[in-house]
Image (cartoon, coloured by chain):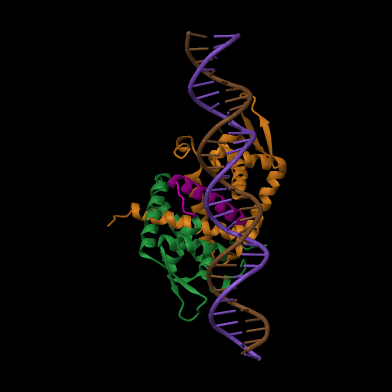
Chain colours: A orange, B green, C brown, D purple
Amino acid sequence: MNNESAPTQELSDLLSDLVSVTHRLTRIAARATGETTSPATWRTLSVLSTFGPMRLGELAKQSRVTQPTMTKIVANLNELEWIRRIADVDDARAWQIALAPKGVKALGEWRARLGQALAPLFDDLDHDQIETISRAVDLLHECTDVRASDVVRAA
Amino acid sequence: MNNESAPTQELSDLLSDLVSVTHRLTRIAARATGETTSPATWRTLSVLSTFGPMRLGELAKQSRVTQPTMTKIVANLNELEWIRRIADVDDARAWQIALAPKGVKALGEWRARLGQALAPLFDDLDHDQIETISRAVDLLHECTDVRASDVVRAA
DNA sequence: TATCTTACATAGCTCAGCTATGTATCGGTC
DNA sequence: GACCGATACATAGCTGAGCTATGTAAGATA
C-alpha cells in the first residue's frame, strides 16, 4: 500500500485526529480555568509576544481572524491597557500594536493558570513523552506561523 | 524542587504553547474548509466512532460540553440521520446514541476535507517529523480521553 | 407510595466572529 | 496639484455555539 513515507490517507487521518483531540484539549482548558477572555485574545497576545509589534491587519492574519474581529480584540486589549497603539510614522492609516507591560504579565498568568489546570492530565507522562509533545508543538509552530509565502490562501 | 524530569514551569509553557498553536490550527481548518458544522458536532461523531454507542450524558462529558448543549447537538444529528437514538432497555429515561451509516460517511468526508485543507502546511515535513506528531497525538488522546477516574473534576 | 436522585429537554442569554459597508489615507497619473 | 483606484482600519448588524437555570419524567430507596 505504501513504501515508507506518509501517504495522503494517513496524513488526513492524523490531521483530523489532531484537530479533534486538540479541540477537546482547548475545551478542557476553557472550562477548567473558567476563562472569560476569548481564545483569540490570548492568541493575539501570544503572537505579539513572539513576533513583536505589528500592524492590526498583520495581527489579524497571524491570529487567523478577520480584520473587524481584530479591531474589536485590539479595542478591548487597549481598554485593559494590555497593549499600546503606536501611530505608524510612515502611514497615517496604520497603527503598530505593541504588547504593554500589563499584557506581558497577563499572558504569563494565563500560561500559569492553563498549566495548573492541564498538568494533572499529563502527570503520567515520562520525560521522553513530554519531549515528544514538545517537539510536535515546535513542528506545529513552524507549519502554522504565517510566512510571507502562505499568508494569503484564506484571506 | 525537581530532579530532572519536566519541571512545572516548563510544563506550563509547553501546555499553553500547545493550546495556542492548536487553536490556530483549528482556526485555519475552520476557515479553509468553510465549515458550517460546529467543532463540537465533529468531536461528538469522533467520540461515537472511537468508543461506540453511549448515552447522551456520557457523550456530553466525552465531548466536553454541557448536557443541554449535547441535547441540541444530538437533535441536529438526528435530523440529519447521522446518528440513531436507541431506547435504553434498562432505563426508560436514557437513550443510547449510535453512529448511523450517514454519520460514518459524513465523518469520513470531513476528515478528508480537513486533510486536504491542512496537508499543504505540512508538505515540508519528513517521515520522522510526521511520526513525532503522530505519537504526540496518541499521547494527547490518552491524556484527554475521559476515564472513569477523572470524569468529574469540571462536571 | 412518598421522596430523593438521575437523565434528558426547554427557555433564554451572552458573546465571539462573521459579512457588508463606511471613512480616511496612500500612491500613481494626468 | 487634483483625481482615482487601492489599502488600512472602524462601524453596524447578524448568526450561532455554548452556557445557566429550570422543567419533566423515570429509576431507586425507604
The residue depicted at 46 percent of the width and 36 percent of the height is: A152
Work out which quarter of the rendered image holds the C terminus of chain B and state it: bottom right
Q: Nearer the viewer, residue A69 or B16?
A: A69
Q: Is residue B142 magenta?
A: no
Is there any visible trace of residue B134 in the rendered image?
A: yes
Percent position (x, y) of residue B7? 62, 59
Percent position (x, y) of residue D5? 48, 22
Q: Nearer the viewer, residue D7 or B5?
A: D7
Work out which quarter of the rendered image holds the N terminus of chain B and state it: bottom right
Query: Against A96, is B78 above or below?
Result: below
Q: Residue furthest left?
A: A1
Q: Is residue B23 magenta?
A: yes
Query: Against B114, is B76 above or below?
Result: below
Query: Against B56, is A37 above or below?
Result: above
Stretch in magenta = B10-38
Magenta-highlighted stretch: main secondary structure? helix
The residue depicted at 56 percent of the width and 53 percent of the height is: B19
Left or right, residue D28 beside residue B138: right
